[in-house]
């Protein structure tokens, strides 16, 4: 309580010397954790889950970035860049799947879609049309 009171007094004093900026005591609050651990094991799991969430977000971001770069290269009609970006995107998808970030079926589906688009671009640039087999 003393700590809270001293913070309120300090912010009030600071606001007196800062023109146009006011701080109310309601602004300064302690934020409760999103999860409450009941024992040491639960605390550890919360830390590990947060660490894994951040790592997974980074991998998902890499995959999305390379997929987007591939789509941009395809839209521009640059075959060389599209092939290279698709190669890197496929590798990123495979690596993320090995780390259990994506399901294997999701990975296969998205790699297939990327390669179909790149192959269609290559055939279009050659002047050929996609062969239909019945």
Image (cartoon, rainbow, N blue to C red):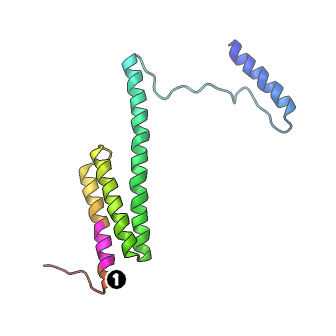
Question: In the depicted view, which residue is nearer to us: 79 or 23?
Answer: 79
Circle 1 residues within 10 Å: few <14, some 14–19, many ≥20: few
Q: Magenta segment: does it hold 99?
A: no
The structure residue drawn at horizontal position 37% and vertical position 73%, both measured from the top left corner, is: 80
The structure residue drawn at horizontal position 33% and vertical position 45%, both measured from the top left corner, is: 101
Question: In the depicted view, which residue is nearer to us: 89 or 106?
Answer: 89
Residue placed farthest to the left in the image? 134
Q: Which residues are magenta?
A: 115-122
Q: Magenta segment: does it hold 121?
A: yes
Can you tell which quarter of the image residue 75 is in?
A: bottom left
Q: Is residue 107 left or right of residue 19?
A: left
Against 20, residue 83 (above or below) is: below
Which quadrant of the figure contains the C terminus?
Answer: bottom left
Callout count: 1
Q: At which x and y percent is residue 49? A: 39, 32
Q: At which x and y percent is residue 104? A: 24, 51
Residue placed farthest to the top in the image? 2
Q: Is residue 30 left or right of residue 125?
A: right
């Amino acid at each position: 309580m003393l700590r809270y009171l001293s913070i309120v007094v300090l912010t009030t004093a600071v606001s007196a010397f800062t023109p146009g900026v006011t701080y109310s005591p309601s602004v300064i609050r302690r934020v409760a954790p999103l999860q409450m651990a009941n024992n040491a094991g639960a605390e550890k799991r919360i830390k590990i889950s947060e660490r894994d969430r951040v790592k997974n977000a980074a991998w998902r971001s890499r995959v999305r970035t390379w997929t987007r770069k591939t789509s941009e290269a395809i839209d521009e009609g640059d075959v060389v860049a599209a092939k290279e970006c698709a190669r890197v995107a496929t590798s990123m998808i495979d690596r993320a799947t090995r780390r259990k970030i994506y399901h294997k079926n999701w990975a296969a589906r998205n790699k297939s879609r990327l390669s179909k688009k790149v192959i269609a671009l290559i055939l279009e640039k050659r002047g050929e049309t996609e062969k239909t087999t019945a």
